[in-house]
Image (tube, rainbow, N blue to C red):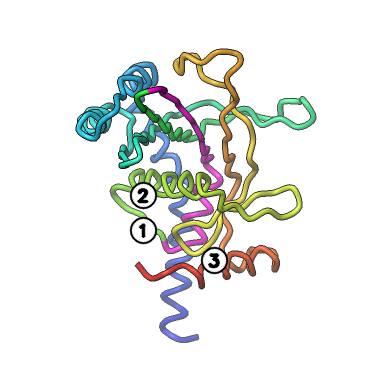
Amino acid sequence: MTSKDILSTTEALRRLSLKRGYARDAVSRARKEPANVRDIMLKIREIRPGLKARIRLVKQIKKMPGVITGSYSSSGTVRTVYREVVAMQTRHEEEELFTEDVLLYSAVFAESTRTRRSLHIARVSLNYHAIERLIERSDCEIGPGFLGLIDREANHILKELARDMCISHNEDEFIRSSYCGVWAGSIDASRPDPEWFASEADPKAPIFSVRTFLSPDEMHPSIWMKWNDGVVAKPAE
C-alpha cells in the first residue's frame, strides 16, 4: 500500500466518522436562522418594472433571514432562494413510514412587466441521509461554513432543475452535482404554502426530493454514461 493509498483511506475513515455530526449540525444551524416566508413573499410581490427597481428589490431581499441568494435579469425576472427546516413525511402506498427534518429550499421566480406580474416556484429537499452521503462519497470541504456549502449546492440543483437537466432512469431522477457525482431522488408535487397567498387553482410547485448522493462508482452504467457526457460537454469555467 502506497502513502497515497494510506492518506486516501485515512480521509475516507475521517469522513465516515464525521458525516452524521456535520449533517445534523447543518440542519441545527439552519433551524436557528428561520425564514419568515410570509415577509419574503410580500417583499417579492413588490416587484416593479424597471431595472433600478429590480436591483433595489434584490438588495432588500438578500438581507432577509433565511434567504440564501437573490438575483435579477435584464428580462424582468427576480430570482430568490430561501431555506427552511421542515418535518417531511415519507409515505408508501398512502401509509406513513416515518417523518424527519429536512432542509427545504424554494426558488421563487417573479416577473413584472407593464401588463402582468407572475410567480413561479420550484423546490428541492435534502434529508440527513443525502447530506451524509455527500460527505462520505465526494471531496466536498467539511469544516466551518458547511451549511453555506449545502446552500450553494442546493442553489446549483435548483438551477439544473430550471434548465430541465434531469437524468431519468426507470422511475428515478438524477441531477448532476457540482461535485463529482449525482443527486438521486424523485420529482414530486408540493402543495402551495399558505404564506404564498396562492389559490386552490394555482399549480403545485415541482420539488426534487433528494434521497441520496452517488459517486461515479455507485452509478448504474446508463446513468454514468449520461452523467459523463454532461461532464465532458461542460465548458471550462
**Which amino acid type corresponds to the residue marked 1 in the rendered image?**
Glu
**Residue 130 is one of the magenta-drawn residues:** yes
The mark tally for this picture is: 3
Give the Cα separation between the discs numbered 3 and 2. Answer: 22 Å
Q: Of helix, strand and loop, which one carries label 3? A: helix
Mark 2 touches mark 1? (CB < 8 Å): yes
Residue 230 — which label?
3
Span shown in magenta: 115-139
Name the quarter where the C terminus is drawn. bottom left
7 versus 69 height, above or below: below
Q: Is residue 183 left or right of residue 150?
A: right
Residue 84 — which label?
none
Which residue occupies 47% across, 80% down? 5
Q: Which residue is mark 1?
A: 141
Residue 82: give x, y in percent of width and height.
38, 32
**Residue 193 is one of the magenta-drawn residues:** no
23 versus 216 height, above or below: above
Residue at the extreme front of the image, as rendered: 115
Q: Which residue is mark 2?
A: 149
Q: Of helix, strand and loop, which one carries label 2? A: helix
Which residue occupies 40% across, 59% down? 140
